Structure formats: C-alpha cells, structure tokens
Image (spheres, grey):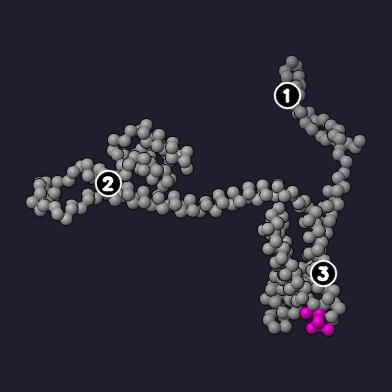
Amino acid sequence: MKTRTDIRTRTVPHTIDGITHYVTETYTVEIPVPPRDWDRAVLTAVTAGAALAVAVSVVWSTAAIGDLLARTVPAGPAYAAAGAFDAAWILCMGVEWLARYDPDRARLPRRAGHAALLIAMAAVAAHGWLEDGRTAGFVGAAVSALAKGAWTVVLAHQSPPLDDRTRQWAQQELAVAGAELGLLPVRRRVARARGLLAAEAAALPAAAPAPPADTDPDADTDPDGHPDTDPDTVRAIRPSTREAVRTAYASGIDDEERVLSYVRKVADPDARESTVNRYLRAVRRGA
C-alpha cells in the first residue's frame, strides 16, 4: 500500500527547573494513499478535450464567418457577429444540460441547438464556396459538428437518466418550488398594497358619516353649530381589532408592541394586549 508523509504539530508539556510550559512539537505521520481513480482521470481528460474542441470550433467559425461578413461591413462588427454563430448552439447546450432531468424542457434547447449548429455550418461552407475552396468549406463546417458531437457525448455520459417514477417525482418537486418562486413577487405586491392602505388609514382621520338626506335641519346641534354625532356611529366605521392586526402584519409590522399601538390607534383605544397578541399569533400561523 502506498503512503504519503504528513507533517503535523501538537502541543506537549516541557519542564525545565520544575517549571512546565506547553510547547509545539512537529511530528510526521504516514497516511495511506488511495489507488488512483482512472475512471475520473479519463473523464476529466475527455471533458478537457471536448472543451478544447469547442474552443477550436469557435475560433475557426469566427474566422471564416467573420471574413465572409467583412465583405459588406467593417471587420470589427463582422467578427463580433461571427462569434454569435457558435455561441448560440453552445448556450443551447448549456440550457439543455440544466434541464437534463426534465426531457420536456430539454427538448426545446436541443432543437434550437441543432438549428443554430446547421446555420453556423452553412455559413462556414458558404465562405469556402465563395473562396473557391469548396472542400475546405465543407471540412471546416464539419469542425463545428464534431465539437458539438463530442460535447454531447460527454454531457450524456455525465447525466445518467432517471427512471420514470423518479423523474415524475423530481418534476413535481420542481413544479412546487417554481410555483412558490412565481408567487413571491405577487405576495410582495399584495403586502406593499396592504401597507399603503394601512399607512393611509393611519394618516387620515376617521370621517363622520354624512347625515341622511331627510335629516331635520332643526336637529340638536352642539355649541359650535355642528349636529350631534352618536359616538357609537363613529366607532362603527373603525376596523375590528382582528382586521387591524391583519393589516399591521401585512404592512410589515411584526413587533407585538408596535402592533398593539397600531390597533389602539386605528381600531380600539381600549384593545387588550392579550387579545391583540392572540390575533397576531393566529395571523403568523396562517401567513
């Protein structure tokens, strides 16, 4: 068995003239070395080779297509646009890899990648045709096909397929997570709207209800000349304690003391702290 030497340190007591201190001591340990993982080494080499093939394809296609486009536009924009031909199918392969456990979602990027590859190959072949090098054009077009083929084989090896039941389970889990993520901005908008309503309710004074149309103009008035208003009627337009707690929580107020202060301000000045806290706990559980 192969071993390797590992240098370590430890703290040991050291005594001189009856006085002991702890000092650092260096020592060596022989650690067994596991056998070389040739499968991992080969896979790493194959992956590196596929990446190199893609890089060569990008360089070759960009040079050929850039020279083709430079016939009608300046060289800078021509070569920049030429890089998009191979970049398109490379990006599609990346998205296909991300959706490797969902065949339905992987179908679109796979088809789009094949279409982008054919377009890039046709552009390279057209460049060779115009340069009176038809053979070179067709061979150059095959470079992109070989690069994509090599990378497709590597990705297929590194993404073993799931059985049908496991794939359905994974799709349902992703669907649930996607639904929660999609509802996040909706919940933010709802909370923001409720917060605005709560802020407006807290800022504006409670208005007394307008008197009925058949109100007697000779009705009793207060010393200021305003009709007497029934306190119970004014109190009726206030929200309930439960509604005020929900509004405060929806607007981002979660502290018990702040919620109690808000309820006493907009709903019931005599609201009990225990009642408000009970409603707040119920709202938290239902959030």
Residue 186 circle label = none
| Residue located beneath label 2 in the image | 237
The crowd level at tag 3 (other Cα within 10 Å; few <14, some 14-19, many 20+) is many
Does 129 lie within the magenta span? yes
Rendered residue at 41%/53% (across/down): 193
Q: Position of residue 172 (x, y in %)?
A: 63, 49
Rendered residue at 44%/50% (across/down): 191
Rendered residue at 72%/69% (across/down): 116
**Which of the two discs, 3 and 2, labels the residue nearer the N terminus?**
3
Q: Would you say residue 224 is visible in this rendering?
A: no
Classify mark 2: helix, strand or loop: loop
Q: Position of residue 109 (x, y in %)?
A: 69, 63
Q: Position of residue 118 (x, y in %)?
A: 75, 72
| Residue located beneath label 3 in the image | 143
Q: Amino acid at mark 1?
A: Tyr
Classify mark 3: helix, strand or loop: helix
**Which of the two discs, 2 and 1, labels the residue nearer the N terminus?**
1
Q: Quadrant of the N terminus?
A: top right
- The residue mark sitting in front, 3 or 1, is 3
Residue ranking furthest to the front = 165
First to last magenta residue range: 126-132
The crowd level at tag 1 (other Cα within 10 Å; few <14, some 14-19, many 20+) is few
Cα gap from disc 3 to disc 2, whole angstroms: 77 Å
Residue ranking furthest to the top = 18
Cα gap from disc 2 to disc 1, whole angstroms: 77 Å
Along the line of sight, the residue nearer the viewer: 205 or 246: 246
Relative to residue 186, is residue 56 depicted above or below? Answer: below
Q: Amino acid at mark 2?
A: Ile
| Residue located beneath label 1 in the image | 22
Does 5 lie within the magenta span? no
Rendered residue at 47%/41% (across/down): 286
